[in-house]
Amino acid sequence: MKFFLYILKEYLKYVLGTVTLTVFLFVLFDFIGKSSREFAEYAPAPQDIFRYYLFQIPGQVIQALPIAGLLASVIAMILLSRTNEITAMRSAGMGPWQIGAPLACGGLLMSLVSLGLGEFWIPSLAQKVHYIHEVQMRKERDDQISGDTRWLRQGQTLINFQDFEPLTSTLNHVKMVEVRANFRPLQSTEADSATYAADTKTWYLKGIKILHFKRNGTLDHLDYADTLAVALPIEPKKLKKDRRNPNELSIGELAEKVERGEQQGMDTIKYKVELHGKLAYPFAAFVVSLIGLKFGYKSERATETTKGVLVAFFIGIS
């Protein structure tokens, strides 16, 4: 158990060092690049700049964990081999599995950290980062809505609206077209506006005109109404423009976008790809951490140390 904790401590020490260096270099180079262009143009407040980089740290940690796990495992095993500690462990009866167990457990720990950050921290922090960058720094409007929400599909009904007012939760110029199996119109409902009632989760249409069509698609007759309550598949909070990129969404949010997009007939391939990547990427740290075990049985010469670190570096970059 002592050997296990000793190797694990060495592994985690180099992981922490690599992650810290990576995050520092990202902040440094990004700050230098933006200082001469964006920060000079928009003159953001110092506290906004500080929060902008602070909220990005967990995302950079996730990006750095696989290569940190790779370098840490290689460096730890090479240094243990050079000091003959691997030889001593093997003499004490420890086999490759026992020596490699701390690397596997450390890599699994890094995978769990990556999965936890990506699922619980990154989605909310990414919203704050984009809000600071686009609204507080660049002074863009915060009432924009997502472009792919103006057209919706619910069964055989196509729904469209022209604009949305976030402050009053009101849709303007709403149109609902119910079609037959041959895609010819059955009924078309047009409304000047629709207001959302949060307590009943119902939309109340106003200024309504209902068009009824014959089987051949020609107009049959018209009806008018002042108000009408309908259950539209629209939630006001989801109409607001999501400034995040697909890789900044949680697994649950990606799965919801895929399901809703398929129901509405939208192209969801980018969300499907990102969903699979979101499930697979955290375990990269676990897989590459096992590579270091190979270097524990290499030669103790200094040239092997340099070669091992370079090999690990290029594997991580690729």
Image (cartoon, grey):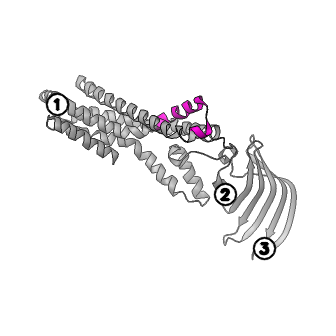
Residue 45 colored in magenta in the image: yes
What residue do we see at 66% from left, 57% from top? 152
Examine the rendering and report whether any part of residue 151 can be seen: yes
Binning the other alpha carbons within 10 Å of mark 3 as few (below 14), some (14 to 19) or many (20 upward) gives few
- Of 52 and 9, the residue lying toward us: 52
Q: Nearer the viewer, mark 2 or mark 3?
A: 2
Q: CA distance from mark 2 to mark 3?
A: 24 Å
Q: CA distance from mark 3 to mark 1?
A: 86 Å
Examine the rendering and report whether any part of residue 116 can be seen: no
Q: Which mark is residue 82?
A: 1
* Residue type highlighted by circle 3: Lys
Q: Nearer the viewer, mark 3 or mark 1?
A: 1
Residue 55 colored in magenta in the image: yes
**Quarter of the figure with the N terminus:** top left
Q: What residue would you read off at disc 2?
A: 152
**Relative side of 292 to 238, left or right:** left
Binning the other alpha carbons within 10 Å of mark 2 as few (below 14), some (14 to 19) or many (20 upward) gives many
Q: Which mark is residue 214?
A: 3
Q: CA distance from mark 2 to mark 1?
A: 64 Å
Binning the other alpha carbons within 10 Å of mark 1 as few (below 14), some (14 to 19) or many (20 upward) gives some
Look at the numbered discs 2 and 1 and tell me whether their residues touch, using CB distance below 8 Å. no
Is label 3 in a helix, a strand or a loop? Answer: loop
Q: Give how far across and how far down residue 242 sits, in percent.
A: 61, 46
What residue do we see at 20% from left, 38% from top? 295
Q: Give how far across and how far down residue 81 sits, in percent.
A: 17, 32
Read off the magenta span: 39-59
Is label 2 in a helix, a strand or a loop? Answer: strand
- Of 248 and 107, the residue lying toward us: 248
**Relative side of 142 to 245, left or right:** right
